[in-house]
Image (cartoon, rainbow, N blue to C red):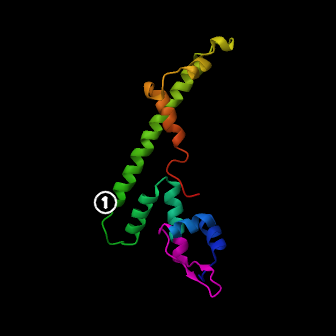
Amino acid sequence: MKGVQIGEAARVSGVKVPTIRYYEQIGLLGVPRRTQGNRRTFEAADLRRLAFIRHARELGFDIEATRALLALQDDPDRPCAEADAIARARLAEVQRRIGALRALEAELNRMILGCAHGKVAQCRVIEALADDRGPRDRPAKRAAREAREIGGSSRGDG
């Protein structure tokens, strides 16, 4: 494959142009060749690397775990124990978050089932939300806080 410019690299890899630039900046992606007009040119190996990074990030691996996995990919004769350890750590985090979501689900179900469908003054949903004990005092509130983090805490790259 002949080198492609950044817009085409973004389209082919599924990684947005600003994110490609970010990956270059933090060293996940090598500095691409430049044309005489100073435009980036991405080769097939760059596109494969971008796809690898995208997939790792979609699975929730943070930047440093992705960097470590890339280093392992770059040295194919190494044993895969380190890659296994990285994946196991990610799995443990996913399982912890699933537990937090289950606790949140149970709390929401409890609130809804406790609703008498009467007036707001007796509403269990409103009462539970108005509870002034902090999140550290109730496991379900802590679970809710952790569950809110699921959507983006490990992603900061656009």
Amino acid at pointer 1: Ala
Residue 47 percent coordinates (x, y): 55, 72
Query: Is 136 drawn above or below residue 12 in the view shown?
Result: above
Q: Main secondary structure of the magenta part?
A: loop
| 94 sits left or right of 21 in the view | left
Within 10 Å of the Cα at label 1, are there few (<14), some (14-19), or many (20+) other Cα atoms? few
Query: Is 132 drawn above or below residue 53 in the view shown?
Result: above
Residue 79 percent coordinates (x, y): 30, 66
Quick one: 11 or 16, which is closer to the camera?
A: 16
Give the total number of marks visible in the rendering: 1
| 78 sits left or right of 15 in the view | left
Q: Which residues are magenta?
A: 26-48
* Residue drawn at (61%, 72%) of the image: 9
Q: Please identify the residue farthest to the bottom as the structure is shown.
A: 36
| 7 sits left or right of 86 in the view | right
In which quadrant of the rendered view does residue 65 lie?
Answer: bottom left
Q: Which residue is mark 1?
A: 81
Q: Is residue 87 magenta?
A: no
* Residue drawn at (55%, 65%) of the image: 22
In which quadrant of the rendered view does residue 54 lie?
Answer: bottom right
* Quadrant assignment for the C terminus: bottom right
* Quadrant assignment for the N terminus: bottom right
Q: Is residue 31 magenta?
A: yes
* Residue drawn at (65%, 85%) of the image: 37
| Residue 88 shows in this picture | yes
| Residue 15 shows in this picture | no
